[in-house]
Amino acid sequence: MTMASVAVIGLVTVILAVELKAVKGEYGVYLVFGAGLVIFFYGLSKLEAVLKALERIQAYIQINTVYLGTLMKMIGIAYIAEFASGICKDAGYGSLGGQIEIFGKLSILAVSMPILLALMETLKVFMT
């Protein structure tokens, strides 16, 4: 599936959801949620290519695996938070979507703290 396919799925879903809104509004939300799940899992399958590329990068420059693992966690958190937030906003619960976004950002910050501390220790060595 290419980006064009994903775009077509999204546009067709939106058009059908708008049409269903006149009949039964909740069916449109279910339809959008289903299409969102299809796109979400397709996006997850694309992460395999990213993982392979990161492994090649690690082989070239000998990066600590902790850093790459943390990077993948951050990407996963951002992807899931954006997906869940978008679904909540589409369903009319924008405040809940906003809370999910804030929690996602805080989670990314928490996951990245060990890397930030390691960077600070490295800078401390160079400053002294």
Image: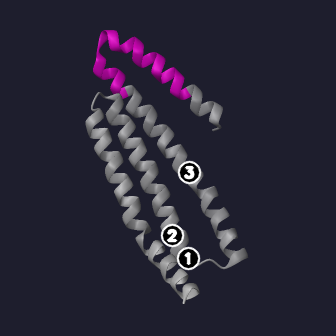
Q: At numbered mark 3, what does the secondary structure look like: helix, strand or loop?
A: helix
Q: Which residue is located at x 42 percent, y 55 percent?
A: 77
Looking at this view, name the residue that lies furthest to the top.
22
How far apart marks 1 and 2 lie (CA) works out to 6 Å
In this figure, which colouring scheme has been used for the structure? one colour
Q: At numbered mark 1, what does the secondary structure look like: helix, strand or loop?
A: helix
Percent of width and height locating residue 123: 54, 80
In the image, 4: left or right of 45?
A: right
Magenta-highlighted residues: 9-30
Crowdedness of circle 1 by 10 Å Cα count: few (<14), some, many (20+)?
few
In the image, 106: left or right of 4?
A: left
Quadrant, the N terminus: top right
The residue beneath circle 3 is 45
Q: Label 3 sits on what residue type? A: Ser
Residue 107 magenta: no
How far apart marks 3 and 2 lie (CA) works out to 17 Å
Q: Which residue is located at x 41 percent, y 11 percent?
A: 19
